[in-house]
Every structure is written in structure tokens, then in C-alpha cells.
Image: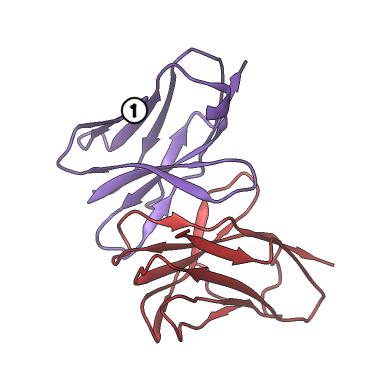
Amino acid sequence: SQQGEEDPQALSIQEGENATMNCSYKTSINNLQWYRQNSGRGLVHLILIRSNEREKHSGRLRVTLDTSKKSSSLLITASRAADTASYFCATDHGSARQLTFGSGTQLTVLP
Amino acid sequence: DGGITQSPKYLFRKEGQNVTLSCEQNLNHDAMYWYRQDPGQGLRLIYYSQIVNDFQKGDIAEGYSVSREKKESFPLTVTSAQKNPTAFYLCASSIFGTRETQYFGPGTRLLVL
């Protein structure tokens, strides 16, 4: 399977701490995207990083991509209770004409 | 407001019944998608369409059908052949290609009576 796998499956932290979640994949990619899903809602796009990029920032979000290790990480700094959600990585493998979503990391930020 | 709307929010299906989930977008996007999400799982692609009057099967198309008669609309029918339809269904769109940023609707939860 080309599916990305997030790690950990669940993460619980205190407000103000940083949260790091990881995504690994098996075959080469054109780009990798991170999405957020609040419980019972649709997904919201957070950031897209292309295979020739190593790091991208957006507000409190920092995404890194290591194509040699076939992995990406999403760092949320100074977390807030409102960051509580599931976070998914989605990979574009080029040969498959679709994004492939992982099973997600459930992040809980405790106030 | 621009965006994607899905209706209904909840849908109940009786055994042997076909049901249709609505998805409309006013973003002027060419590509639209249907995903299925089971509890604690990621998204699996059912069907996608990159242009009006054309659509392609995704990974789990069996028991589902779609149409794309208008750019703005991409309804999904869950047929009686889908034996395990209980899930959360998400519609999405993107400007053109299947690999770019996708914009999601709020979802429809389908339950079987």
C-alpha cells in the first residue's frame, strides 16, 4: 500500500506545549499535504510541501519533509485547546492520480 | 460565500434502498471527489471527476454511482449493492488536478435502519 502512516495515533499535551506528529510513506511523492479535521466535520487544508522542499512554515505550523527517509513531520507550536482535532497527511505519488490519506493522529490539547 | 455544501447532514437508509447524497460547490473548481471515512480511519476515495460528464472510479467504487452533469454538482448514489454503507461521506473539490489542495464539504453521515 502507498498509504501514509501517521505516528503517533493519539497525542495528548498541555496547552502551551508543542505537538509533533509524523507521517511516513512508502513510494516517492510529488507533494505531501497536511489536513486537519475537527470531530464530525470536513477536512481543512493546512499546508502543502513539494518534494523539492525541505521545510515550510505557516503561522504556528512547521512542516518538514525528508524524502530520503520518506517521512514528514508537522509541528504545532504553543498549542491551544482549539488545536484539538485529527491531523492527516495526504501524499501524491504521481503514478496514482489521486491523493492517498493516512489514518491520522488524534491530538488532544488540555487546557 | 464560496464553498462546498453537502446535504443532508444525516441520512438514513433502509435495506434495499438507494439513497443520493448531494454535493454542490461554487468555487468554480474543475475537479470533485467523494471519500468515505470509517470511524478512526483515514479517507478512501470512491469516485472523482476532473471535468463535466467524465468521472473515474477510486479505490472503493463498488456499490456506488455518480454523475457530473454540471460543473457545480457531483451527487453520489449509494446503491443497494453497497452492503456496508454506514460511514461518514465527504465531498471535496480542487481547482483542477487531483493532486492539488482539496477543499472539503462538512460531510454527510449515512446510517442504516
The outermost residue toward the front is B1
Image quadrant of residue B20? bottom right
x and y, in percent, of residue A7 in the image: 46, 31
Which quadrant of the figure contains the C terminus of chain A?
Answer: top right
The outermost residue toward the right is B113
Residue B83 in view, yes or no: yes
Question: From the viewer's perspective, is residue B111 above or below residue A43?
Answer: below
Q: Residue at x 71, y 72 (%)?
A: B83
According to the rendering, which colour does chain B have?
red
Image quadrant of residue A63? top left
Q: Amino acid at mark 1?
A: Gly
Q: Nearer the viewer, residue B69 or A90?
A: B69
Marks counted in the figure total 1
Residue A29 in view, yes or no: no
x and y, in percent, of residue A26 in the image: 32, 45
Q: Residue at x 45, y 75 (%)?
A: B72
Q: Residue at x 55, y 77 (%)?
A: B75
Q: Which residue is mark 1?
A: A59
x and y, in percent, of residue B9 in the image: 69, 61
Q: Is residue A45 left or right of residue A29?
A: right
Q: Residue at x 58, y 23 (%)?
A: A81
Among the chains pictured, the one given purple colouring is A
Neighbour tally class for label 1: few under 14, some 14-19, many 20 plus, Cα within 10 Å: few
Question: From the viewer's perspective, is residue A63 above or below residue A2?
Answer: above
Q: Nearer the viewer, residue A69 or A12?
A: A12
Q: How is the image coloured?
A: by chain
Secondary structure under tag 1 reads loop
x and y, in percent, of residue B71 in the image: 41, 78
Question: From the viewer's perspective, is residue B90 above or below residue A89?
Answer: below
